[in-house]
Image: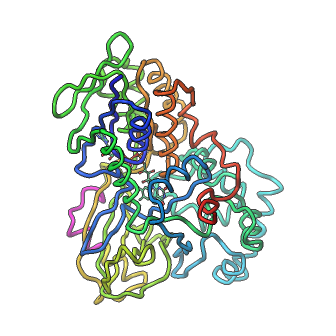
Amino acid sequence: MKIAVIGAGPAGLSCALELARKGQDVTVFEADTAVGGISRTISIWGMNVDYGPHRFFTMDKRVADFWIDTIRDDFILVDRLTRIFYKNKFFDYPLKPLNAFVGLGFIESLYCGFSYLKASIDPKKNEKSFADWVSNRFGQRLYEIFFKTYSEKLWGISCDELDADFAAQRIKGLNLYEAVKNALFKGKAQHKTLVEQFAYPRHGAGEVYERIADRFAALGGSVRLGVSVERLVIKDGRVSGLDTSEGFFACDEVVSTMPLTDIIEHTDAFSDAVKKSSRQLTYRNTTLVYLNIAQADIFKDNWIYVHANNLQTGRITNFRNWSPDMLHGKGEAILMLEYWSYDQDELWRMDDSALIDLARREITATGLVEGRAVGEGHVVRIHRSYPVYARGYETHLKVLQDAVDAVQGLTCIGRNGSFKYNNQDHSILMGLLAAENIADGARHDLWKINTDYDYQEGKSALNEERSK
Ligand SMILES: Cc1cc2nc3c(=O)[nH]c(=O)nc-3n(C[C@H](O)[C@H](O)[C@H](O)COP(=O)(O)OP(=O)(O)OC[C@H]3O[C@@H](n4cnc5c(N)ncnc54)[C@H](O)[C@@H]3O)c2cc1C
């Protein structure tokens, strides 16, 4: 059996390595010139940085074992420190009752308390949107202060238009009571968004994927960098090969992590109705602006969420606070400001120098850094970084899932590959289980990962491993 994997990100590489370990003949096609997908690490000004803050966390033992077997001892556990910047004040995130009370003031805190009580007694029926979901669990007032602005910056649509699925997937089981309980009783099983430590490879998130690629190559696997897949070829209802930028590649199985909508759009065998549904699904883009700061000690947070309405950036990451091995002994810091946009937005089309000017203005406006400390800038654009869970997206996604399932030899996994708001751990799990389906005849329902696969254990499988 000849297997082609599209994409050398976490999902594609995990799948490829597992298949190679099971003795399969696997070729990976990667459009970019490096492995790691959006979890890669790059070097700027002699220091390592990621494509956005990439903490690693998993509740799944299989993923934890795979990750640790890859990185071995070359990771650290980082104490998470993140805050929210709102109305020129910093609030702890996860929210801490006393800190929020002091920051908001007595009157606003009282309003928040009443609004939470109201939501507890008389919740909105039939939760459909993100706004309904969060305000039912935190009260309207806290939702507006701590969830609305940030989410609307990130998604570029109103929280009433954002599907409740997004909240249910990302902050499942969390409510104000849970957040307060977590703050008061540390050390008990914590909600996954509230964990205070995360694992991080010494040289950056991408180190894991470079090692996976090396292991895959050592088993005879081939990663074809700079080769993009343009079309899937289907004959009589089954996969027969791929049209790539370097010609036709015949194969029996395809594991695709390229955007699901692209594979549908460029494959003749899919019907117009399926393509019509595919065009209803959209992605958000991310622009990362890295700034070199001539100062080592700026702030202690790993990242800061920017809720302030007058700033376009949504998050500021300080790469000095991740792993000392990334700094290579340098005395300065790299701050990274994130900007989100759609293809048609001005922000997405701005040139590098305008973006660097914007980031310089915004970082000084926060008061975190003095203007004279801000040096050079560097811009990275990630096209389609987030699948958008606009209300009703699931109906269209189901049409695509059914169409993919009807093709023999086709498996679609990964963040854009399955149109799921995946973290690295979800994509790795999809890769591992896809390999079992193909090589061992297992029947895992991969569409359910990051939807119905519950994080049941309530604590980090990695921390458990580490303490052994
Ligand atoms: C700003 C930001 C912050 C994040 N923070 C975290 C975090 O803290 N923790 C965490 O766990 N996760 C985080 N993530 C998510 C994480 O980056 C992804 O979940 C993960 O990289 C997804 O892996 P993947 O393999 O599914 O997809 P990708 O990483 O997107 O890899 C897909 C690969 O397919 C390739 N490809 C696409 N089309 C083609 C084609 N036609 N032909 C050939 N190759 C193709 C791409 O070039 C890419 O390399 C973050 C993401 C972003 C954007």
The structure residue drawn at horizontal position 61% and vertical position 46%, both measured from the top left corner, is 164
Left or right side of 442 for 237: left
- Where does residue 398 sit, x and y in percent of width and height? 52, 28
| Residue 83 in view of the camera | no
The structure residue drawn at horizontal position 34% and vertical position 35%, both measured from the top left corner, is 5
- Where does residue 430 sit, x and y in percent of width and height? 50, 39
* Quarter in which the N terminus is drawn: top left
**Could you tell me what secondary structure mostly forms the magenta stretch?**
helix
Left or right side of 48 for 353: left
Q: Which residues are magenta?
A: 346-358
| Towards the viewer: 310 or 421 | 421
Question: Does 369 sit above or below residue 462?
Answer: below
- Where does residue 215 sit, x and y in percent of width and height? 36, 48
Task: Find residue 15 and report its image quarter.
Answer: top left
The structure residue drawn at horizontal position 48% and vertical position 46%, both measured from the top left corner, is 428
* Quarter in which the C terminus is drawn: bottom right
Label total for image: 0
Question: Does 173 sit above or below residue 357?
Answer: above
| Residue 330 in view of the camera | yes
Task: Find residue 127 and report its image quarter.
Answer: top right
Colouring: rainbow
Residue 315 forms part of the magenta stretch: no
| Towards the viewer: 455 or 352 | 455
Question: Does 221 sit above or below residue 287?
Answer: above
| Towards the viewer: 80 or 400 | 80
- Where does residue 94 sit, x and y in percent of width and height? 63, 69
Residue 352 forms part of the magenta stretch: yes
